[in-house]
Image (cartoon, rainbow, N blue to C red):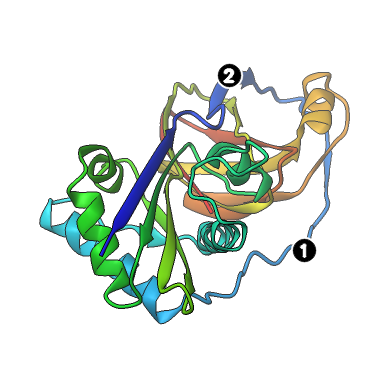
Amino acid sequence: MVVLLALMLLLSALSGCVTNTVVGSNHDPSYTLEVRDYNTSIEHNLTAEEKHMVDLINKVRKENNLSELGISVRASKLAREYANEMLSRGFFSHYDPEGRSVGDRAREGGLNYRQVGENLALVDSLKNISEKAIEGWLSSPKHRETMLTPEYNKVGVGIACSREEEKCYISSLYLDTMFNVYVPMQNDSRAVVNVQMNSPGLVRISGGREMKVMLTDRENLAKFKKREDYKIYGQWEGREVEFVMFPTDTIVVESDGSLNLSLEME
């Protein structure tokens, strides 16, 4: 039995959170609310073997006192497509024949992330596929490091097998989708948080204290700064809020004190 391995790590794939404070006043312009309907649910369709591999990855992480990884359905779909592409086109590499890297594929596939890593495996067997791939990754310092990176919180796995050739291609994508940023706030002030999104997705924000979060876009933010009437796409209050964000959107946060924002993307 032969197991071939390959890995790639891409750091800072997104520009991350950029904050600046916009001072409010008692003469703010008026705004209108435009409600957008977008379904963020994506069918969870991992195969039994793919789910088994996720379980083994999380078992290894638990044994090393690390948090388990949640399943990213989008990343799993992308990983499965790439495993099938390697199988059908007969190559094994982090770069496809057109030269696209994991970062290129992740962006084109609409993944929202701060950091992404990829482990690949080619197993010459149809039995114990996940166990053999994990064993190979653990025996390689770089692959082991990718699997045990503390910052990762999501994983996607894809497996494609040929029964005629008795071999399987495995792709696993590891994602860091969390941002943590300190936002200095004073009374009657707002913070603008810019997050680069590759596709519409669910965003969760917690600030450690009561806050108001508004969602607008860059064009309407410019109108707000000029004291012109502007448009928002949602408004939420609480210590933790959740909403759908589009690539053109900007987050505006109000609070009576500084915030330690924790932002997670789906």
Apparent side of residue 197 relative to residue 256 in the rendered image (left or right): right
Residue at coordinates 21% horizontally, 43% vertically from top-left?
A: 140
Q: Amino acid at mark 1?
A: Asp
**215 relative to 236, above or below:** above
Q: Where's residue 200, x and y in %?
A: 68, 51
Q: Where's residue 76, x and y in %?
A: 50, 62
**11 relative to 71, above or below:** above
Apparent side of residue 142 relative to residue 65 in the rendered image (left or right): right
Q: Amino acid at mark 2?
A: Asn
* Residue labelled with disc 1: 37
Q: Quadrant of residue 145?
A: top left
Q: Where's residue 253, x and y in %?
A: 58, 35
**216 relative to 123, above or below:** above
Residue at coordinates 37% horizontally, 55% vertically from top-left?
A: 121
SS at mark 2 in the image: strand
Looking at the image, is mark 2 or mark 1 nearer the viewer? Answer: 1
SS at mark 1 in the image: loop
> Spatial distance from mark 2 to mark 1, Cα to Cα?
29 Å
* Residue labelled with disc 2: 20
